[in-house]
Amino acid sequence: MKKNVFVFSRLSPEHQQRLRHNFNVTLLDPAGDIDAQYASALPEAHGLLGVGRPFGRAQLERAGRLEVISTISVGYDNYELAYLNERGILLTNTPDVLTETTADLGFTLLMAAARRVPELDAWVKAGHWQAPVGPAQFGSDVHGKTLGILGLGNIGAAIARRGRFGFNMEVLYSGNSRKPALEQELGARYCGFDELLGEADFVVLVVPLSAQTRHLIGRRELALMKPSAILVNVARGPVVDEAALVEALQNGQIRAAGLDVYEKEPLRESPLFALPNVVTLPHVGSATHETRQAMAELALDNLERALLGGTPRHRVNPQVRAR
Ligand code: GLV
């Protein structure tokens, strides 16, 4: 008998068809009653596929048949892992395929904030360009500066490579473990957290969100940064105390920020909107046609393997075995 899969995110018609080949598929209708759809689908579901919704004890207590959740993301802070482990529910994710795309976006934000791209674009379109530009429109150099990476994992390393080899930047990193191979490859220098904050011209956040990294950057940390420094966040919003960041940007404590993620998403209203020295993107780190396609393929593959008797390629909690 076919197992039941509940898809809670948008899925292309081709992927829907592929899924229907092996499973009874229910798709969430975003225009319908969301809670009612979850209430009827979860008790029946053997597998869940999607991204962007929290799942833990509160949501899954009635999901008695659930074997696997396949998230279409690399990050898994939306999932209450201890509860999934207790229940024997496997969680799979989609790393690697989004590494270079997310690094592109991280570097885009860094450059856009440094050279004030959105601000000057709006300025030109508003008809303000009536004479050659002066210091009021000048930005900051990127090449040759110091790039501080917090979270030198795959994406962090890909951003560091862009800085080192594309822009001749000095790379600093901090964290729980040293990465000798990256130190060798990039000439990256391992240093203390406070030292990195004090020395970097660009502080780029790429750490996963956890109890340890929530509000990693707050008032104290922003005060340690140079007044000329730029903060880039492509990790998760709660890694930064957003109220403290707003204050720091308002007071000129740091020069600018490039943000892809926020404490509360979608960001509908925010004091950030009034600040010209912040570039705001709508959580698009991996959002290219090619990469989102690759992520969906990988998430489907993970789900199929988990429910049809294979071993998924990317298991977050491999100690749990799919039934
Ligand atoms: C994006 O934020 C992801 O975790 O894939």
Image: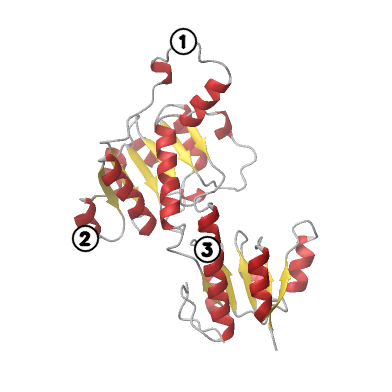
Residue 295's tag is: 3
Query: What residue does disc 1 label?
Result: 131
Q: Is the CB atom of the residue marked by disc 3 within 8 angstroms of ligand 1's nearest atom?
A: yes
The type of residue carrying mark 3 is Met
As helix, strand or loop, the secondary structure at mark 2 comes to helix
Q: How many marks?
A: 3
Instruction: Please tell me the numbered disc located at residue 203.
Output: none
Q: Residue drawn at (55%, 68%), measured in percent from left and top? A: 297
Can you see residue 79?
A: no
Q: Is residue 232 above or below residue 309?
A: above
Of residues 83 and 5, the one nearer the viewer is 5
What amino acid is at disc 2? Pro
Which circle's residue, 2 or 1, is located before the other in the chain? Answer: 1
Q: With respect to residue 24, does 33 lie above or below?
A: above
The structure's colour scheme is secondary structure
Q: Which residue is mark 2?
A: 180
21 versus 219 height, above or below: below
- Screen quadrant of the N terminus: bottom right
Q: In terms of secondary structure, where does tag 3 sit?
A: helix
Residue type at numbered disc 1:
Ala
* Image position, residue 36 (x, y; %): 79, 66
